[in-house]
Image: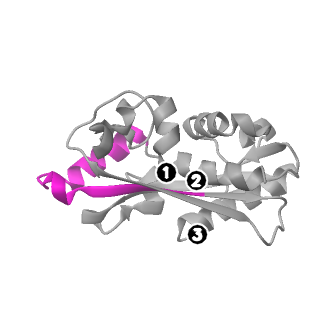
Amino acid sequence: MNSEIVLASSNPGKVKEIQTVLANADIIIRPQSDFDVPDAIEDGLTFVENAIIKARHACKFTGLPALADDSGIEVDFLNGQPGIYSARYAGEHSNNEANNKKLLKELAGIDLNQRSARFQCLIVYLQHEYDPTPIICQGTWEGFITTELSGIQGFGYDPLFYVPEHQCTSADLTPELKNRISHRGQALQKLFSALTK
């Protein structure tokens, strides 16, 4: 297996988390920005479709094996929204602040016990652009949406995602602990096992 893999993401938070978790796999993870790869058009209807689209796109442009993750948050009260649209929940060019603000607005006045949610992460590894058997790994992290932002770690919806076992938000956790228990951490551990077999 090639020890250099391109990560089909321009999100610095994701790049850092993935590099940290796979640091012991003797694999060099390089973000697609190193190769001037343009962002793929994510027009799939599921996390796994979008992850495959992004990985295939990165393979095509770089000639290297590629890793892509598609992840987001599902809120039960909102019938699973924002889901695959998590990154652009407040609009096509929205940011974390706008997305969090919209989610709080949508859940205004809703009791905590009705604010159950989960982070989903689908990670896909392709050896080349035409790889017919991608490695697909999934991680799920259960929690609730809080009524206000808390914490400074992480990115995205982390300041709103309450983790009951630790009685704090994801953004209050240390990066080490988050990488161990999060949806992305779970999916990456499965991928690490698959890649090092």
Task: Specify the amino acid type for callout 3.
Answer: Gly
Eye-nearest disc, 2 or 3: 2
User: Which secondary structure lies at badge 3?
Assistant: loop
Residue range in magenta is: 95-122
* Numbered circle sitting on residue 44: 3
Residue 24 sits in quarter: top right
Q: In the image as oriented, which residue stretches furthest toward the front?
A: 197
Task: Specify the amino acid type for callout 1.
Answer: His
Circles 2 and 3, Cβ within 8 Å, touching? The answer is no
Q: Position of residue 32 (x, y in %)?
A: 74, 43
Pointer 3 local density, CA inside 10 Å: few below 14, some 14–19, many at least 20: few
Q: Position of residue 132 (x, y in %)?
A: 80, 72
Image quarter hosting the C terminus? bottom right
Q: Position of residue 109 (x, y in %)?
A: 11, 53
Task: Kindly identify which residue carries mark 1.
Answer: 183
Horizontally, residue 84 falls left or right of residue 81, namely right
Badge 2 or badge 3: first in the primary sequence:
3
Task: Kindly identify which residue carries mark 2.
Answer: 187
Asked whether 107 falls inside the magenta stretch, the response is yes
Eye-nearest disc, 3 or 1: 1
User: Which secondary structure lies at badge 2?
Assistant: helix
Q: Position of residue 174 (x, y in %)?
A: 44, 28
